[in-house]
Image (cartoon, coloured by chain):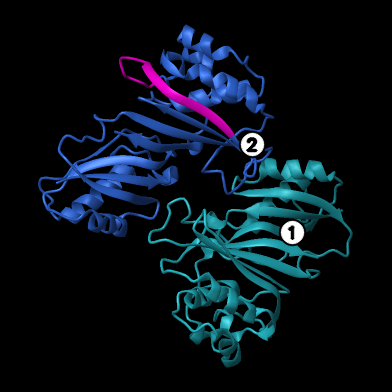
Chain colours: A blue, B cyan
Amino acid sequence: MRYKIILAYDGTKFAGFQAQPNQRTVEGVLKKAVNKIAKEPTPEIQIYGSGRTDSGVHALGQVVHFDLPIEMSEVNMLNALNSILPLDTVVKKVEIVDQNFHARFTTHGKKYEYRMALGKFVDPFKRNYTGHWKFPVKIELIENAIKDLEGTHDFSSFVASGSTVKSHVRTIYQASVREDKAQNEIIFEFYGNGFLYNMVRIMVAVLAEIGSERRPVDDIPRLLEVKDRDQARGTAPASGLYLKEVDY
Amino acid sequence: MRYKIILAYDGTKFAGFQAQPNQRTVEGVLKKAVNKIAKEPTPEIQIYGSGRTDSGVHALGQVVHFDLPIEMSEVNMLNALNSILPLDTVVKKVEIVDQNFHARFTTHGKKYEYRMALGKFVDPFKRNYTGHWKFPVKIELIENAIKDLEGTHDFSSFVASGSTVKSHVRTIYQASVREDKAQNEIIFEFYGNGFLYNMVRIMVAVLAEIGSERRPVDDIPRLLEVKDRDQARGTAPASGLYLKEVDY
């Protein structure tokens, strides 16, 4: 039986999604929980995520699949996983899917949200759950500029130097920004067919600079053109980033 | 010069407010910051809080005062403290007050808020910031029962066994509860002239049991009468408790 699960996690205390030796990772705790349920140590059950998230990055709707040699109902799997998983990880939904489903290879799109807290000082309750930008922001400048990211582009200016993928061409179906005045936050949303290493965080840093007039409002077409990471400069902190949804 | 400061802190990583040897406490980090600003190691400047908060308990409006041998404007003090303090503590307001003000001895009232998350599983993003109650709740039962706590009573049934104060008589000016349906939380608020050790957390545990019909709706007058801590049973977790306001 193949199980698709949708899970949320607070990334603060994880060294990212992907399993690494001697590190606490989402994949690590989840794989351990699944194997505990299966009670079959050999062969070890592998789990497959839609993609990695970095250390400190959160998920509201990460998707993972795995094959279990025993049969268990969706609701029993949900309860079993949540009774084993640590409190910073929760399974929101379990679905039995057919063998054609693959969490990584059959994705159609991913949606990321970035929450940026404004104000002079960091709110202690938001320090792990938002980025922070202390400069005044004109939201209409960001609204204007963010549309330049939509479409199919070579995002070489927006990829961290550690990336090893061959192509930097990705499609952003939709990019938007809104203000949450009650929370004094700016919330960015990006929906696309895939994102490069640190791509969302670099885009957000550029957009914040545009919003504070530290960079011209029409700078994004230029950055896409020059394909030079150094010209994008900053990377917004991991704490504000949420993997919100993965579509298949 | 006497300075009154209002501060917020995320209590998750503090061993409570009060300074203790080899423990990270709010008083400890604040005292260190104040003494760094004063640049006078002898005699050491003492700080006085409105009262303690336990490990894991948060504050939105804790009040502290201290005397500084040098003169500094309110805004400069605010900026100086926030540039030194760790990110889980923030000073929201600084006020120069006269020598009659004392953060602990001149309080008129304190307001506490308790946030209880409902639902079967713990939300990973709320695990340090709410209590959790997985049983169905009838809010009208709590609304009814909570009013029995208002007024002047002997709260001996609602004090943790570690308490050493002589009198357990306190006055609750106002006690209320509301539902936040969007967040799926119940929020309790208590405003009184003082609170005993764990008193709010014990009251919340009793009220939650009443809301889930695990205890009769008229049980509070009986508990106040019997003055027996064992009959109140539970203590809601520290993570949901916020010191919201201190009045003078």
Which quadrant of the rendered structure holds the C terminus of chain B? bottom right
Q: Residue beneath label 2, please?
A: A118
Tell me, yes or no, whether the highlighted magenta stretch contains residue A177.
Answer: yes
Mark 2 touches mark 1? (CB < 8 Å): no
Is residue A224 found left or right of A85 in the rendered image?
A: right
Q: Position of residue A129 (x, y in %)?
A: 51, 43
| Residue A213 in sight here | yes
Q: Quadrant of residue B134?
A: bottom left
- Residue A55 inside the magenta-drawn segment: no
Q: Position of residue A217 (x, y in %)?
A: 61, 16
**Chain label for disc 2:** A
* 2 or 1: mark nearer the eye: 2
Q: Secondary structure at mark 1?
A: strand
Estimate the spatial distance between the alpha carbons at disc 2 and disc 1, rounded to whole Å: 26 Å
Percent x, y for residue B44?
Answer: 75, 56
Q: Residues within 10 Å of mark 1 (few under 14, many from 20)?
A: many
Name the residue rendered at 39%, 55% in the picture.
A87
Per the rendering, the mark at residue A63 is none
Residue B19 can be seen in this image? no
Task: Indicate which disc residue B64 carries.
Answer: 1
Which residue shows up at 63% across the image and 82% down it?
A: B148
Farthest residue, direction bottom: B226
Relative to A7, B81 lies left or right: right
Numbered range of the magenta stretch:
A162-178
Q: Is residue A166 left or right of residue B88?
A: left
